[in-house]
Image: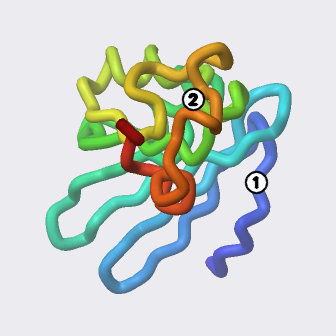
Amino acid sequence: MTYSGEVTVGGPADVHELPDLMITKIAVGPMNNNAYLLRCRATDEQLLIDAANDAETLLGTIGEDGIASVVTTHQHGDHWQALAEVVTATRARVRTRAARTPRASRCRPTSWSTTATRSGWARSS
C-alpha cells in the first residue's frame, strides 16, 4: 500500500516504510493533531514526535516495544497534552525546549537564546 500521509482522528495510522526507518503517522485530539512514531529498523528503537492528545491511542500505537524518547516540536498546548501520561507509561526521555513538562506559563519564547530558538534544544543561561 502506498503511503498517503492522510490520517483522521479515530481512523487508522498511516505507515511510511523506508529502508532504515518506519514512520507511523496518526491523528489525535479535538484539534486533529498529527503525532509521528519513528522506528529505527536497525535497532528497533522508537521515538514519538508530539504526544499531542489521547494517550491511550498513542500508547496503543507505540505498543509493547515502548519508546526511548518523546520529542515535543513546540510549546503550544495541543502538542503535549498526553506527554505526562505517555512518559509515565513508557519511562521515555523527554526532548523539548522546556526544562519540565510544558505549561503555557513556563514556555515563554523570550527565555530562549537565538540559537536555542533555531535549534529548539538548548536552554539559554
Q: In x, y percent, where is residue 55?
A: 54, 22
Q: In x, y percent, where is residue 78?
A: 72, 29
Above-or-below relation of 117 to 67: below
On the rendered image, what quadrant is the C terminus found in? top left
Above-or-below relation of 122 to 79: below
Q: Is residue 36 left or right of residue 54?
A: left
Residue where numbered disc 2 is placed:
57
Q: In x, y percent, where is residue 65?
A: 24, 41
Disc 1 and disc 2 in contact, CB within 8 angstroms: no
Residue where numbered disc 1 is placed:
7
Q: In x, y percent, where is residue 89?
A: 33, 18
Q: Secondary structure at mark 1?
A: loop
Colour treatment of the image: rainbow
Outermost front residue: 125
**Dot 1 alpha-carbon crowd within 10 angstroms: few under 14, some 14 to 19, many 20 or more:** some
Identity of the residue drawn at 57% across and 47% down:
73
Which amino acid, by three-letter code, is at mark 2? Thr
Residue 5: quarter of image: bottom right
Looking at the image, which is closer to me, 65 or 68?
Answer: 68
Q: Is residue 33 left or right of residue 117?
A: right
Which amino acid, by three-letter code, is at mark 1? Val
The answer to which of marks 1 and 2 sits earlier in the sequence is 1
Identity of the residue drawn at 35% across and 34% down:
94
Residue 29: quarter of image: top right
Q: Secondary structure at mark 2?
A: helix
Q: Gap in Å between the C-alphas at discs 1 and 2?
A: 13 Å
Above-or-below relation of 35 to 57: below
